[in-house]
Amino acid sequence: MAYEVKALAEKLKAKGLDVAEEAAKVVVEETLTWIAEEAVKSENKMDDLLVAIVPVVKPHVLKAVDKIDGQEG
């Protein structure tokens, strides 16, 4: 079978993909926290939506990031 994602994941894991996944988790966590903090400070009322949306979106984004290495968990 051509373009096997699992085979690619194994090659990337050998080059530190699991480390990349952990780094991505930190980046996502901090970025979403920062967005929520800054949205509160903003005078733009549209940014108030971000305050409500970030907590809803965050677990879904982190779940996707958790699959970077081809496995969940």
Image: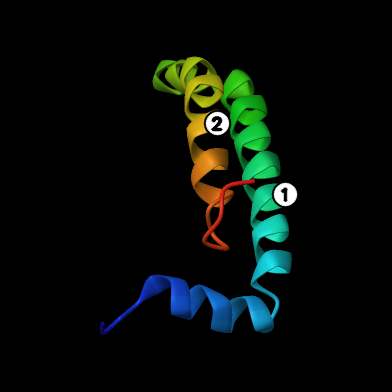
Disc 1 residue type (three-letter): Val
The image's colour scheme reads: rainbow
Q: Are marks 2 and 1 in contact (CB under 8 Å)?
A: no
- Say left or right for 15 vs 54: right
Disc 2 residue type (three-letter): Lys
- Element on which disc 2 rests: helix
Is 56 rendered above or below residue 33?
above
Tell me, for residue 64, which label it has, or none: none
Q: Nearer the viewer, residue 11 or 44?
A: 11
Q: Quadrant of the N terminus?
A: bottom left
Question: Residue 7: percent from the left, percent from the top?
Answer: 46, 79
Question: Residue 21: percent from the left, percent from the top?
Answer: 65, 60
Is 54 rendered above or below residue 73?
above
**Most extreme residue toward the left, as rendered?**
1
Q: Residue at x 73, y 67 (%)?
A: 19
Count numbered badges in the picture. Answer: 2
**Disc 1: which residue:** 26
Measure how far apart labels 2 and 1 are at the Cα level: 12 Å
Q: Residue at x 61, y 26 (%)?
A: 36
**Disc 2: which residue:** 58
